[in-house]
Amino acid sequence: MPTFSNTVSPTPFGFFDSDAAFQTEADNMVNFVKRKLGDDVLSVELTKKEIWTCFEESVCEYSKHIHEMKIMSELSNILGMPTGSTDLTNKYTRNTLEHLIRMADPYAVEANVGGAYNAQLGYFDIEKDKQDYDIYADLKDATTDDVIYQTIASGSKGKLKIVELFHFEPLAAQHFLLNASNITNYLASNFNYESYINSTVFYVLPVFEDVLRRGMLETAFRVRRSQYSYQILGSKLRLFPIPVLESQTGKVYCKVMEGQNPIEPTAYTDDAIYGVAGPENAPYTNIPFTNITQPGRQWIRQYTLALCRELLGLIRSKFQSIPIPNADLQLNGESLVTQGREDKDKLVTQLKEFLTNLTRAKLLEVDAAAAENMNKNLRYIPMPLGKSIVIG
C-alpha cells in the first residue's frame, strides 16, 4: 500500500515533502479525513494525493496568517533589511528606532542639523552696484570654481536650495561676554542698559545662562546693529545693502543643497532601499511543519477536513444522482460544498481573532492592564506594622 514517503510528487508544490513530521501526519490525515466523511459507510471519492494536496494547502494557510500577524507587529523594525539571504521565519526580532530615524531625516535636513543629504560650500562673486545674482548661473563651487548647477548630471538636475548664506557682520564681541563680570558694562555701553559701576557684583551662573546669553546677543546684533541681509526670490538672490563700495565686493559664501532624491541620498550609499519595502517582500517563508505545535496542528487538521469536504462536494456535484436497481441514489454535493466553505470561514475567523490579540501593540495593552490591576490589588494587602510590605 503506497505511503506518502514512497509516492512520487505527493503534493503539488512539495513545500513539506521532506519533513518527517509532515510525512507521518500526511498518512494519518488520509484515515482521519475518510473516516470523518463516512468512508466506512459510503465510499469517499477522494484519492490520497487529493487529501495530501488539501493538507499542504492547510499548512500554507496557517503559515500565511501567522506571518500576517508578525508583519503587522514587526514591519517597522524590518524595513530595509536584506531580502535575499535573510529568513525571519521563527525569528524573534528586536525593536529598533531605524524606521523613526529614517522618517526624521528630512526634518533634520530642513533644520540644518544632519540628515541623509550633504550640503556643499558655494560662493557668489559680488560685483559693485549689482544687487541680484542668479543661483543657477552665478553660484560656484568653492573647491573647483565651477558653476554648481552645470556640474549636476543631466537628468538629475532639480531645484537648488540655499541652506545658509554667510552674509552678516561678524560677532567678534561675543567671545568675552561669557565672563559675567564684563556683561553689565558691555550692555550699558552698547545697548543702553543701566550700569552699576560702583557696585561689586559676583555671579555664580549655570551654564544654560551662558548659552541663552549668547543666543540673545546674536539676535541683538542681527536686529539692532547689522544692516546685512538677503532675500531669495525664485532663482535670484538679492543682497542688502547694495554693494556700492569696492570694500563690499569679493565673495559671499553659502551652503547649498541639490534637490532631495528619495532613492539616492547624497550623504551615503543606502543599500536599505533595495531591502524590505513592505509586506510584499518581507522575508518570511512557510513554517516547517515540525515546528508547529499541537494547537496549530489541530487547526490544520480541521482546515484540511473542511477543504476535503468542499472538494468532495464539488466532485459529487457533477452528478445529481446515480441510478441503482429500482431507484436513484441522490448525492449531497451541494450541501458538502456549503458546509466545507462555512467551516473554512469559521476557522479562518477564529484564527485571525486569536492572532490579532497577539500583536505587539495588543500585548503591550495587556501588560499595561495587568500592571494596573496588580497595583490595585496591592492596595488591599495589609502592611505589617503600618510601615512596609515584607516580601519573602
Image (cartoon, rainbow, N blue to C red):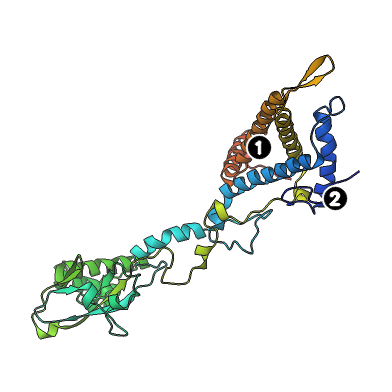
Q: Which label belongs to residue 216?
A: none
- Picture coordinates of residue 249 (x, y %)? 15, 83
Quadrant placement of the C terminus: top right
Q: CA distance from mark 1 to mark 2?
A: 30 Å
81 sits left or right of 203 in the view: right
Which residue extends farthest top? 326
Quarter occupied by residue 365: top right
Q: Amino acid at mark 1?
A: Leu
Local packing at callout 2 (Cα closer than 10 Å; few below 14, some 14-19, many 20+) is some
- Picture coordinates of residue 180 (x, y %)? 29, 72
Query: Which is closer to the viewer, label 1 or label 2?
Result: 2
118 sits left or right of 273 in the view: left
Q: Amino acid at mark 2?
A: Ser
**Residue placed under numbered mark 2 in the picture:** 5
Residue 185 visible in the snapshot: no
**Residue placed under numbered mark 1 in the picture:** 351
Q: Earlier in the sequence, mark 1 or mark 2?
A: 2
Q: Secondary structure at mark 1?
A: helix
Mark 1 in CB contact with mark 2 (< 8 angstroms)? no
Between residues 122 and 166, which one lies in front from this camera angle? 122
Residue 115 visible in the snapshot: yes
Between residues 317 and 65, which one lies in front from this camera angle? 317
Quadrant placement of the N terminus: top right
Between residues 27 and 208, which one lies in front from this camera angle? 27
Q: Is residue 141 above or below residue 108?
A: below
Residue at image position (66%, 37%) is 351
Residue at image position (41%, 66%) is 115
Q: Is residue 280 above or below residue 201?
A: above
- Picture coordinates of residue 139 (x, y %)? 24, 77
Q: Secondary structure at mark 2?
A: loop
